[in-house]
Image (tube, rainbow, N blue to C red):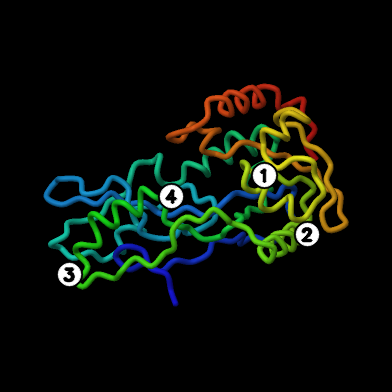
Amino acid sequence: MAYLFPFGQKLHPLVQQDKSPKKVFVLGVYASAVHAKWKKDGQIICQALAVASEPCIFWNGKDAKEIIDKIAIPAELGYLEPAGKQLNGPSAKVLDDNILKPLGYIREDAWLCDCLPETRINSSQAKVIKERYNPLIEQYGLNPVTIPNRPTAFCDQKRAEEITAELMESEAGLLILLGDIPIAQYLKKVADVPYSTLGEYVDLYGYGKATNVVICGKTIKVLPLAHPRQIGALGAHSEKWFKAHREWEKKAKTHDAP
């Protein structure tokens, strides 16, 4: 069964397209979505409604209007336009400018992956769908939204094995983990490490310091960093990790990057 967004777009997984050898492998949590502002008669019904899967993993927000313009919506319900720039592709900018660049890498050097390669409905999206979209389904013949809600488990053993296969295929010598979830739900399943969170890692080794880890018989440098939400101060975030990352960026030239 296909999972559907509001107004009918199908959910699809986001995976690395360029599978040539890479220098760095980046593991995030789960895929985001294209967000639209839903308006009617000049009034905003929803500031940011998830309406489609992103066109590529760690999408930068480019062509949001073209994507949204292709989504059919009954004229009586108004129209869709791109949500703010901070809602379409902000994590990609953080990845490029605040993670890869300080290490001397560009996007083409990186193999990108998520613990869960599909988007999910978070609590704020679930609320607006329930209150604004669902009451219109029967009257206007709209599709029910069938995308699952955001889980707490993003990476089971099978998925961990799939990620490891991608990591080996990438030939990357550096694995960057974004936030606690890739550490706890992926790394702990595939390697013997004495930490389960970014905080525990930093207590042992310091923020932004890569360490050697054996994964599938291969020694790889592992660099846990804060989630892009924290690094880029994207909405609610931790000032602690925001400042820690900024300090790391200033010193990045002296860090050991493969």
C-alpha separation, residue under disc 1 versus residue under disc 3: 44 Å
Q: Which is nearer the N-term, disc 2 or disc 1?
A: 2
Q: Where does residue 182 sit, x and y in percent of width and height? A: 65, 48
Q: Residue under circle 1?
A: 177
- Three-letter amino acid code of the residue under disc 1: Leu
- The amino acid on which the numbered mark 3 sits, given as a three-letter code, is Tyr
Q: Which numbered disc flags the more N-terminal residue, 3 or 2? A: 3
The structure residue drawn at horizontal position 75% and vertical position 48%, both measured from the top left corner, is 23
Q: Nearer the viewer, residue 258 or 128?
A: 128
Q: Which mark is residue 93?
A: none
Label 1 vs 3, first from the N-terminus: 3
Q: Residue lying farthest bottom?
A: 1
Judging from the image, what secondary structure is the residue with disc 3 in? helix
Distance between the Cα atoms at labels 2 and 1? Answer: 16 Å
| Numbered tag placed on residue 140 in the rendering | 3
Residue picked out by circle 2: 168
The C terminus lies in quadrant = top right
* Disc 1 element: strand
